[in-house]
Image: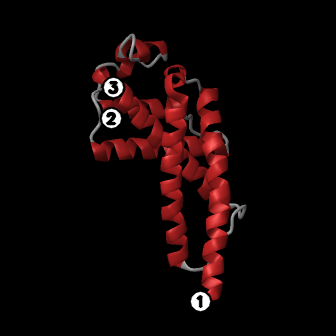
Amino acid sequence: MRTRGVSAALEALNLQALAGRSAQDVFLGLVDFVCPNGGTVDDGIAREAFIETIVELAEQGFPDLDALTVDQMQTVFELYATHAIEARLCNDIGTNAIVLPASAQAVANVEMQLRDFIKNGVADALAKAGDALQALTRENVLGFVDEVYQDAFRILLALAEAEDDKDDDE
């Protein structure tokens, strides 16, 4: 997209109908291409993360796609990766792979600490990736998300146990 332009990138994806549309329309049009509906749980998590990213971009004001900077592209990717990791962890909580403390306040504390950890972990991993971000593939993105997710999973377990122990002591 950066080298050939938005229209050429959309045409390469057979999405030329989105050319010339607003950034919001382009992102919404990409949802079904990037994350098709009706797939696996992981596909649903990816779709939810992409939609959450679009919502956050809408709140911040969509960037001009024709003038998208590297920093803006990195921000979009950071938002997506953060939302994907949070959604995977929520799925783990829902399937009881992780048990949260009983107290609502303790859960809120864990959630806040975890969100900060994920955002920082994603930003750090992107900084380490450097120029490799120029050639992102689906496999690279999934590997990147998996790596930060595994770290976040371990942190979530530790935070949940610490908050639960603190509740027991009170």
**Which structural element holds mark 2?**
helix
In this rendering, the answer to whether 8 lies above or below 109 is: above
Q: Are marks 3 and 2 in contact (CB under 8 Å)?
A: no
Report how far apart the C-alphas of labels 2 and 1 lie in the structure.
48 Å
Of mark 1 and mark 3, the one earlier in the sequence is 3
Q: Which residue is mark 1?
A: 170
Q: Amino acid at mark 2?
A: Gln
In this rendering, the answer to whether 165 lies above or below 66 is: below
Say if residue 50 shows up in the picture: no
Report how far apart the C-alphas of labels 3 and 2 lie in the structure.
17 Å
Residue 129, percent from left and from top: 54, 29
Say if residue 52 shows up in the picture: yes
Of mark 3 and mark 2, the one earlier in the sequence is 2
**Viewer-nearest of labels 1 and 3?**
1
Of mark 2 and mark 1, the one earlier in the sequence is 2
Residue 89, percent from left and from top: 61, 55
Q: Are marks 1 and 3 in contact (CB under 8 Å)?
A: no
